């Protein structure tokens, strides 16, 4: 049996079975808690199952495409993504004060979600075929490529998504090996930019979210309600939790957005600290496998792209858990592959499809 045959047997349909196992475990756990958080709504479950099937289908499709074939199309994909963001500001659908979606008739599409994948692809494309670490000039160009879409998304306004898009591009620069003095300089620049962000870019309701982070009890029935109820739910779960379907904060509808942004609070109330530990271990398994794939990639493009996609997945987890536990402002970031929703789930699964393609489409130098 030659090397090519052994590789094909190990990776059926170019799917990394280890990573796939972690993803399916997480998706299954998500359906279990969503059934409880959604009030045992069968229609809700069916819609989520359809979205999961679509996400798995996209992942399977992208896993079949060698990443080198995608490489040459990346600038055009980036351009299309930016044009879609501009189109959102011109003719986008508005909901709850935000203009983030394009109505295609048969579905509502959120272009900012796909930029979480396009951004690291573009920055990786720009840096991969050049000497690393990148020169100062290339870093400046990369930052411009990052900032422009981020500002378009922040204009919608969608601070949470703009944060994820920015981080996905910044991670590529970090993995490209830029010097620590540049990182510290960038952090200083960000710190100096905060007053401008606060007074000229952030909307009043976004400013209020930051204020609420430090004192949610100042408005317990208004802006602080979400965080207060979330903390009550998490704390009341204790060590072992109240049991599946027995969470009072969620079942009695005290907890808002319990199927989306605050589903982690529902999970903690019903499964407790032990359940939260299990969930974190599943996430850690997926993250560690993704980083292993990045380390094993055969070229710079594969390494940078896989590592940045995995790191963006980590930011999803960190931001959602941080805001639900009151450590970060509420910015509307879902718990990845757990929260109810379509565009975010499909986008994340597309990212894992690229990661699997990087790992399974090896270029064999000998047979």
Image (cartoon, rainbow, N blue to C red):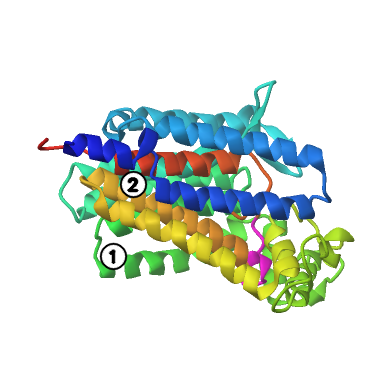
Q: Is residue 278 left or right of residue 144?
A: right
Pick whichever, 144 or 17, lies toward us: 17
Q: Earlier in the sequence, mark 1 or mark 2?
A: 1
Nearest the eye: 115 or 359: 359
Kindly indicate the quadrant of the structure image that contains residue 343.
Answer: top right
Q: Is residue 326 magenta?
A: yes
The alpha-carbon separation of the residues under discs 1 and 2 comes to 21 Å
- Screen quadrant of the C terminus: top left
At which x and y percent is residue 355? 37, 44
Left or right of 123: which side holds 195? right
Tell me if label 1 and label 2 are in contact, CB under 8 Å: no
Whether residue 329 sits left or right of residue 71 in the image: it is: right
Q: Residue at x 70, y 72 (%)?
A: 272
Residue depicted at 62% across the width and 56% down the height: 202
Q: Quadrant of the N terminus?
A: top left
Q: Which type of secondary structure does the marked residue at label 1 adopt?
A: helix
Q: Position of residue 169 (x, y in %)?
A: 39, 50
Residue drawn at point x = 27 percent, y = 69 percent = 180
State which mark lies toward you, 1 or 2. 2
Residue 316: quadrant of the picture: bottom right
Question: How crowded is the residue under tag 2: few (<14 C-alpha within 10 Å), some, or many (20+)?
Answer: many
Considering every residue shown, the one lying at the far right of the view is: 252
Seen from the viewer's position, the closer of residues 47 and 99 is 47
Question: In percent of the image, x 34 and y 70: which residue is there?
Answer: 184
Prevailing SS of the magenta stretch: loop
Which span is picked out in magenta? 323-331
Most extreme residue toward the top, as rendered?
105
**Can you identify the residue that label 2 sits on?**
305
Whether residue 167 is in magenta: the answer is: no
Relative side of 252 to 324, left or right: right
Q: Let me know if residue 78 appears in the view.
A: no
Q: Which residue is mark 1?
A: 182
């Amino acid at each position: 049996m030659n090397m090519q045959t052994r590789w094909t047997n190990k990776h059926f349909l170019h799917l990394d079975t280890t990573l796939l196992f972690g993803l399916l475990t997480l998706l299954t756990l998500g359906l279990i808690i969503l059934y409880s958080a959604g009030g045992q709504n069968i229609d809700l479950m069916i819609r989520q199952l359809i979205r999961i099937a679509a996400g798995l289908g996209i992942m399977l499709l992208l896993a079949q495409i060698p990443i080198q074939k995608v490489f040459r199309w990346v600038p055009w994909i980036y351009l299309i993504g930016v044009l879609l963001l501009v189109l959102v500001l011109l003719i986008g659908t508005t909901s709850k004060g935000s203009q983030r979606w394009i109505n295609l008739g048969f579905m509502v599409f959120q272009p900012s979600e796909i930029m979480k994948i396009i951004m690291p692809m573009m920055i990786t494309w720009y840096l991969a075929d050049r000497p690393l670490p990148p020169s100062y000039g290339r870093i400046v160009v990369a930052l411009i490529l990052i900032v422009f879409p981020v500002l378009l998304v922040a204009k919608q306004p969608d601070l949470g998504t703009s944060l994820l898009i920015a981080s996905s591009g910044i991670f590529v620069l970090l993995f490209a090996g830029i010097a620590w003095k540049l990182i510290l300089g960038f952090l200083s620049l960000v710190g100096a930019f905060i007053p401008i962000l606060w007074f000229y870019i952030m909307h009043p309701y976004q400013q209020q979210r930051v204020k609420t982070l430090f004192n949610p009890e100042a408005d317990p029935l208004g802006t602080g309600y979400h965080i207060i109820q979330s903390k009550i739910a998490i704390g009341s779960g204790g060590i072992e939790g109240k049991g599946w379907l027995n969470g009072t904060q969620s079942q009695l509808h005290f907890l808002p957005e319990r199927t989306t942004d605050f589903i982690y609070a529902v999970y903690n109330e019903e499964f407790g600290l032990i359940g939260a530990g299990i969930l974190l271990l599943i996430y850690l398994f997926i993250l560690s496998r993704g980083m292993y794939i990045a380390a094993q990639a055969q070229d710079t493009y594969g390494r940078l792209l896989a590592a940045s996609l995995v790191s963006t997945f980590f930011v999803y987890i960190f931001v959602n858990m941080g805001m639900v536990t009151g450590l970060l402002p509420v910015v509307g970031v879902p718990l990845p592959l757990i929260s109810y929703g379509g565009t975010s789930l499909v986008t994340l699964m597309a990212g894992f499809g690229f990661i699997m393609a990087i790992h399974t489409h090896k270029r064999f130098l000998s047979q």
